[in-house]
Amino acid sequence: MVEPYEGVGFAVYSYNLMAEVYNDGRAERKNLEQIASDIDASYPWGERYGWRYKAWLRARREFFEEHGLPGLQPRRSLKLNNEFATYR
C-alpha cells in the first residue's frame, strides 16, 4: 500500500501520480483515451472506497478537465426542475 509522504494529502499524491502517468503517455505518443485508461489503472490503494478513493476522484476530475482527457461523467445538477430548491 502506498502512503503519501508526510505533509502531502491523498489528493495531491493522486494528482502528482496522474501527472507522471500523463507525461509518460505523452512521451510514448499514446492517444488521450489510452492515457486516461492508464491513469485509471494506476490507482495505488487497492479497493476503491473510502476517503482515499474520494480524494482520487476529486483529483481525477480536476486533472481530466485541465488536460482535456475523455471519460468524465457529467456533474449532477443541484437544480430541481431547472429551478433552485427553496426551503420554507
Image: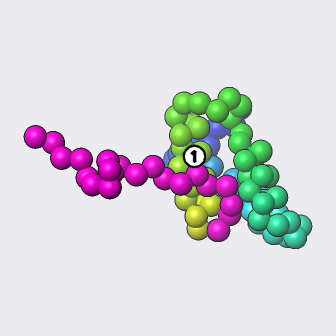
Please state which of residues 64 and 59 is positioned toward the viewer in this rendering: 64
- Residue 58 image offset from top left, x and y in percent: 53, 49
* Membership of 31 in magenta stretch: no
- Tell me the kind of residue under disc 1: Leu
* Membership of 83 in magenta stretch: yes
Please tell me how crowded label 1 is: few (under 14), some (14-19), or many (20+) other residues with Cα within 10 Å.
Answer: some
Q: Residue at x 64, y 33 (%)?
A: 48
User: Which residue lies most toward the right here?
Assistant: 28
State which quarter of the image contains the N terminus: top right
State which quarter of the image contains the C terminus: top left
- Element marked by disc 1: helix
Instruction: Describe the colour scheme in one phrase.
Output: rainbow
- Residue 32 image offset from top left, x and y in percent: 77, 65
**Horizontal arrangement in the rendering, residue 40 relative to residue 34 (left or right):** left
| Residue annotated with mark 1 | 57
Q: Which residues are magenta?
A: 68-88
Up-down: is 73 above or below 19?
above
Q: Residue at x 67, y 55 (%)?
A: 71
Work out whether residue 8 can be spotted. no
Q: Main secondary structure of the magenta part?
A: loop
- Residue 30 image offset from top left, x and y in percent: 86, 66
Give residue 45's quadrant in the image. top right
**Horizontal arrangement in the rendering, residue 83 relative to residue 74 (left or right):** left
Q: Residue at x 79, y 52 (%)?
A: 38
Q: Residue at x 59, y 30 (%)?
A: 49
- Residue 52 image offset from top left, x and y in percent: 57, 37
Give residue 65's quadrant in the image. bottom right
Up-down: is 74 above or below 49?
below
